[in-house]
Image (spheres, coloured by chain):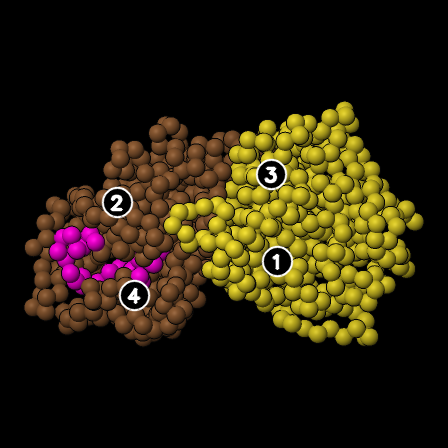
Chain colours: A brown, B yellow
Amino acid sequence: MPQLAPVGQLGTQAIGDVPTEAGAVIIDAQLAYHRWGEYRVNDDGISNVLLIEHALTGDSNAAEWWDGLIGPGKAINTDIYCVICTNVIGGCNGSTGPSSLHPDGNFWGNRFPATSIRDQVTAEKQFLDSLGITTVSAVLGGSMGGARTLEWAAMHPEVVQAAAVLAVSARASAWQIGIQSAQIQAIENDHHWHEGNFYESGCNPAVGLAAARRIAHLTYRGELEIDERFGTKPQKGENPLGAYRSQEQRFAVESYLDYQAEKLVKRFDAGSYVVLTDALNRHDIGRGRGGLNKALEAIKVPVLVAGVDTDILYPYHQQEHLSRNLGNLLAMAKIVSPVGHDAFLTETRQMDRILRNFFSLISPDEDNPSTYIEFYI
Amino acid sequence: MPQLAPVGQLGTQAIGDVPTEAGAVIIDAQLAYHRWGEYRVNDDGISNVLLIEHALTGDSNAAEWWDGLIGPGKAINTDIYCVICTNVIGGCNGSTGPSSLHPDGNFWGNRFPATSIRDQVTAEKQFLDSLGITTVSAVLGGSMGGARTLEWAAMHPEVVQAAAVLAVSARASAWQIGIQSAQIQAIENDHHWHEGNFYESGCNPAVGLAAARRIAHLTYRGELEIDERFGTKPQKGENPLGAYRSQEQRFAVESYLDYQAEKLVKRFDAGSYVVLTDALNRHDIGRGRGGLNKALEAIKVPVLVAGVDTDILYPYHQQEHLSRNLGNLLAMAKIVSPVGHDAFLTETRQMDRILRNFFSLISPDEDNPSTYIEFYI
């Protein structure tokens, strides 16, 4: 019986040394995590664990960012399942990352190696191993969490019984690499970056991180939704139409983006942002596996794929590509929303139906009839 | 008879003081321009001038950037028309802008006022007035040039006989303002910016301008086209999948964006980039005219509207909005292309047909039958 952190509280787990795909080692690592629901194992030896995978700047408190979807009786039902969400390796919410102390007592800083999505899964596998959890009922995640979910299905079919892959692709597209690299450069161009070793200096490349977030946020949100909210409105008390340009005289949307950026700067580490964004650039399910489609075909874990019709970061055709090529497609669902990429977080009612369908498909139960949205199996 | 610059050569024209919409004055301004074809006036007193409006970092050498579309016998037929293309006010290709010398002998720098799209038209109107040109057969332009074209039709219907408005909207959207402001900030955050007065110091905010261009380029190009060209390929001789992240180890798409950025830095001024991008943020055909749709309805100049199906910067629904609301829609055309926004520059064959249709609609000629692509009048 694994020794799990108390329900809803942040726990940490030592996971030993994590070797990376590219040949480095993250020594003496730990992952932080949350869990909800009691751990059980069924007659077939399959645990009731659901592994939830957070997105780039998300964290292990999934019940907060997937508010309304996780809890007793909810789509991700903690009466039935033991829900576990780790903080990703390389992050800054309790798991080992660039802002963590290295065993030598100094910060990891730029000694923290580049990681791939596969390395994130490797760390999580060591986490489950260290707890004695050998099987999970399902892995679920969107965006970077969806990339991890897909790699889980590819790397450890012996562990994963089913997967729900949301708003992601089989590999990074060139456009994603481009826009993500622009964000990394914004941070690396900040003179407080100090090649990634700013922790001891007391500096913080906050301007660079804020710039990165403003760009990123515009890839997470659909232009229809943003325009509906802000249009060309000036920020209250400011005049962006004055005779001379001024940074202090903003449109409302600029103020909104500044606010999003400030929020992120307060809660997130620039070093982690670079490491995790670089991991997204490296996402490629086909690498070393004979190419994309061969790798997808080889995935025999049942996978539900869902995407957002207005997503410009992971356009819907990328989820269609997954659905065409996965070796065992469970279902395909489309989230219809003006919100864009983030709709997998914000369209709770649609996600509720998609996830309830998912669970009814992976553990059929006549008391839980599914209500289809748009499934093409 | 206007004294025009020799065919195909850069000319300059003093246009006097240009008052801006927001209440400043650009004193003693000039516009630089190119022209092709001979000037004529028909029996109705209408000149054969076609005014071509360039995009943000474009210039007056339209025969170069619209290669294949301007010349004798081409869609923009210089045997028939006198084609004139000015460099926009605020730019850096011969027209007065922040990098120009002020009459006091120092650089304009940040004394150069904020300009709107309407100010750009005002300057161009003064340019035509100074040459004695009182009518033009048509104004044509895409992107920022399309915004100018639309304002020409709204501001000076007595001058403009017809207009072709490509890949633009009735006003800036919040998403555009967001992504454009991110570009402005990249420049303003460069420590070589010096509040816009870097010219005398010999500094150049090249890093900021390069960062702005990388972002911008990803809004000009469709993800399908970029992915088809670059995918996840590494740049030759570099390894972006190494054990530690390095700026020097790039994906091919990063190298491509760096190249685009370097090219722009060599040919464009950061001060002009800020002024013109700010002008795009201010684009709003409805301002002071009773709102967008009333302003569009009031435009009685016949307008052809065209857009690109994969444009994420000016999505096609924005051109549909124009087409629904313009007071005298001549035709609507869709450019179908994976290229995104820039398709109005690159899809020469489609543009050729659209422009030939446009000219046949505005001056019917039985020798020049039109070949429709997708016109919904």
Amino acid type at circle 4 is Ala
Image vertical order of residue A217 relative to residue A370, above or below: above
For the residue labelled by badge 1, is the local secondary structure a helix, a strand or a loop? loop
The quadrant in which the C terminus of chain A is found is bottom left
- Is residue A69 shown to the viewer in this render? no
Q: Earlier in the sequence, mark 2 or mark 4?
A: 2
Q: Quadrant of residue A204?
A: top left
Residue at the spot x=76%, y=75% of the render?
Answer: B369
The front one of B348 and A224 is B348
Q: Quadrant of residue A258?
A: top left
Which mark, residue B206? 3
Please give the range of residues in magenta. Answer: A126-151
- Residue at numbered disc 2: A27
The quadrant in which the N terminus of chain A is found is bottom left
Amino acid type at circle 2 is Ile
- The reply to whether the C-beta atoms of the residues labelled 4 and 3 are less than 8 Å apart is no
- Residue at numbered disc 1: B342
Q: Is label 2 on the same chain as label 4?
A: yes
- Residue at numbered disc 4: A154
- Does the segment drawn in magenta span residue B294? no
Instruction: Give the residue furthest to the right.
Output: B1
Residue at the spot x=81%, y=62% of the render?
Answer: B71
